[in-house]
Image (spheres, coloured by chain):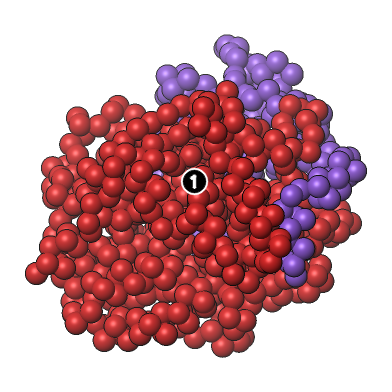
Chain colours: A red, B purple
Amino acid sequence: MSQDTLFDKVWDLHKVSNLPGGSDQIFIGLHLIHEVTSPQAFGALKDKNLKVKFPSRTVATVDHIVPTDNQSRPFKDNLAEQMIETLEKNCLKHKIKFFNIGSGNQGIVHVVAPELGLTQPGMTIACGDSHTSTHGAFGAIAFGIGTSQVRDVLATQTIAMNKLKVRQIWCENKLSSGVYAKDLVLHIINKLGVKAGVGFAYEFAGPAIDELSMEERMTICNMSIEGGARCGYINPDEKTFSYIKNKLYAPNNEKWDKALLWWKSLKSDENSIYDDVIKLDASKVEPTVTWGITPGQSLGINQKIPQLNDLSPNDQFIAQEAYEYMGFKPGQSIKDTPVDVCFIGSCTNGRISDLRVAAKVLKDQKVSEKVKAFVVPGSEKVAIEAKKEGLDKIFKNSGFQWREPGCSMCLAMNSDKLIGNQVSASSSNRNFKGRQGSPSGRTLLMSPAMVAAAAITGKVSDVREVINK
Amino acid sequence: MKSEFTPPFGKITKIVGKCISLIGNDIDTDRIIPARFLKCINFDSLGESVFEDDRETLKGKHPFDLKENKNASILIVNSNFGCGSSREHAPQALMRWGIKAIIGESFAEIFYSNCIAIGIPCFTLPKESIKDIQKYTESESLFLEIELRNSLAKSKDLNFSLQIKESSRKMFLSGEWDATATLLDNENLIENKFNNLPYLNFNTNLF
């Protein structure tokens, strides 16, 4: 059993009681809600005649269903309109802070909370969304919950949960040039598998992680869940603190000093005990692309799609399904696969640094005529900053469509969808069958730089070669 | 879809029903209920859309469309079932179709906790045992009577033990899987925690 890790410290601090069944009752320091997984929870409160326990510890925004082309109200999609109206009403009724469209602070919930300084080290953070693990980048213990647990957090500010084990993933050396956090996390999931993290919190550590910016760290923690881990985190350091400083909801003045002192005490002790430790060499990671229907089915840009015999017996079944669905043959190259749609955005890679990297690749270049390309900033703040830097013009001049903030084609709950069996190069997090809105649509996950490269050439390309051309 | 749906309530001690096998590893919640069906403010009509795209692709041959699986209520799955999105809509859709318990090699974590929270016991068995059951159900109907008390499954021919997390088993037997009331019992402790967490102190400028 783990001891003296950040996870242990934060868990113990938030433990309210041992429940009769043996689970722990854990206090949730920050609760984030959005329009998709909250309406039924508010409905259940009403049915049970309960109030929101601490309205000041819940924050709402709208992201999954928002259109990214025309956001004027009412939305064209009646169901989407009904969902945003329901959230507006629930927040008003229960006095919950709501960052609505046009507030300047709306966006994907996992982009918004960090950029407002709401996400801080040492917190427990829950949200009805599996990518809540993103907030672990700050040394918070953050995890996705279902709607019944959203109800429980609203009503009690606590949930029933079993303590997780802790696996440290130690990343040696540094990422090489043209290789990004997305490549590293896809590589980790490929090496460990999509279910290795069940029952674990992942602690990402080592020189390669220290080197990453806060936004890159968010990309890593964001995809913990794709490796099966409900929660992933990184010990806070100076980068963490300076990212938070002066944000809208960050502690200020003498409170900042108090906060800093406490945050510094949180990181895993030098002699802490882990349930498991995995080491890997980050300098060996190549630009990585998925070829299959799980985020674990990925390869380096210069590798070949695996043969069935190269895979462990456990992975063969899903590989067979993936060859068939994706239309790939074992042994085939992923490089030069033609793409139809290029999507940059999502809670994994829709932040300002992601847009900067992609814009750098796209500057003075044109998107292939065969490709539909669009970029969806992760939040209104990201969009404003991008415009200030002129990134929107670079995208538009290259042939990318510039959209309004939201989750968009990561999960295609709005009108941004693949058609038929189109292939998308996507900076999002899931390549499941049908994920991007068409039951036969095919998704190749990659870094924003790689999406930009694919947009220019019209096929899966090594961004390092596209830049150097 | 079964027409008269009543959600489970109180103590869950026994599950009786016919098995339905669904073969495949890493079946994610997008497949169980595609995202377009999440545009709803209640769960009521999800049952009919469970596995919509997979069923459409298989044109009537999907296990959830086969005549012999009508009225089945114990779902037999392979490994990492329910991975991906945290959408509770997935187990809600299964439950509204008629599923009352799931037996699998392994479950994704958030899916598992969602199942517990809505009253669907999830049991595990070794890979080979799951395969045996799935093979058996290809040709025969398998009716099981599962006792939560001792995690024993009985059929007309054989009895076997299922695995379930002890905390989950206890919650079903006591009715505390429906957790809100139990959590609220500790209201004083919750208030105490709220007043004493360091960061709630230095974050008084919130809202």
Residue at the outermost left position: A469
Q: Is residue A324 visible?
A: no
Q: Amino acid at mark 1?
A: Ile
Q: Position of residue A233 (x, y in %)?
A: 51, 45
Judging depth in this view, the residue of A17 and A438 nearest the camera is A17
Name the residue located 59 percent from the left edge and 84 percent from the top edge: A102
Q: Position of residue A58 (x, y in %)?
A: 72, 61
- Subunit ID for the residue under disc 1: A
Name the residue located 89 percent from the left edge and 57 percent from the top edge: A49
Name the residue located 24 percent from the left edge and 76 percent from the top edge: A362
Q: Tell me the residue that label 1 is attached to.
A: A234
Q: Looking at the image, is B164 positioned above or below residue B43?
A: above
Horizontal relation, residue A409 to residue A62: left or right: left
Q: Looking at the image, is B125 positioned above or below residue A279?
A: above
Q: Residues within 10 Å of mark 1 (few under 14, many from 20)?
A: many
Residue at the outermost top position: B158
